[in-house]
Image (cartoon, helix red, strand yellow):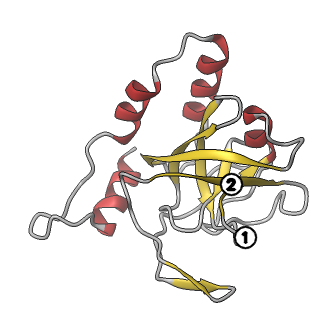
Amino acid sequence: MPKGGGVAKLGQPYSVGGRVYVPRVEPGYDRRGLASWYGDDFHGRRTANGEIYDMNALTAAHPTMPLPSYAYVTNLSNGRTILVRVNDRGPYVDDRIMDLSRASADALGLRGRGIGSVRVRYAGPAPLDGNDRRERQFLAQQSTGRGPTLAAATAEAGGAWPRAATTGVWSATAYRAQVASR
């Protein structure tokens, strides 16, 4: 499956099912809620930012996070944490906060149940080239018990976010520049 090929995307507010979503950079994003997973029906199709969806990659969909970006997802029932590449929009069912790829759901131990309680933390921009080394490395380190603490990984992943010099607001232009530089 080809990697990358998408664009950095924040987008305008949009509405699905009568609910309005406002994509934005939110460095402190840290929410608990339900996650589901999606696989075969979308495998090989384009994601919201133009990448090809690979159900075997550590990816996810989120309604408002910048595309592409990284997020830490923790299964609250077993404590497993993974790093995913957010490259798609959704979910738009009930009050779910994230849709996971099949590989992400497997790594978290959620696939068999189809849905589970998770904690999602924004971890910064992801590169446009689709390189998945960072997600796989984080997963490998977690499974061997030799990984960095989540606090250290979060600090490394997020780094310092660019702010617009005059407004102090997170800048979409600065976000795209940050993505391009990684």
Pointer 1 and pointer 2: residues touching (CB < 8 Å)?
A: yes
> Which sits in the foreground, 121 or 163?
121
> Which sits in the foreground, 75 or 139?
75
Task: Mark 1: give few (<14), some (14-19) or many (20+) Cα within 10 Å.
Answer: few
Screen quadrant of the C terminus: top left
Query: Alpha-carbon distance for marks 1 and 2?
Result: 9 Å
- Residue 34 - label: 2
**Residue at the spot 59% in from the left edge and 47% down from the top edge:** 85
Q: Position of residue 133 (x, y in %)?
A: 59, 31
State the image quarter where residue 146 is shown: top right
**Residue at the spot 72% in from the left edge and 70% down from the top edge:** 94
Q: Which residue is mark 1?
A: 94
State the image quarter where residue 46 is shown: bottom right
Instruction: Mark 1 or mark 2: name the one nearer the start of the chain.
Output: 2
Q: Is residue 1 visible?
A: no
Helix, strand or loop at mark 1: loop
Q: Position of residue 101 (x, y in %)?
A: 75, 49
Task: Mark 2: give few (<14), some (14-19) or many (20+) Cα within 10 Å.
Answer: some
- Residue 148 - label: none
Q: Amino acid at mark 1?
A: Asp
**Residue at the spot 37% in from the left edge and 31% down from the top edge:** 156
**In screen coordinates, is 148 left or right of 43?**
left
Q: Amino acid at mark 2?
A: Leu
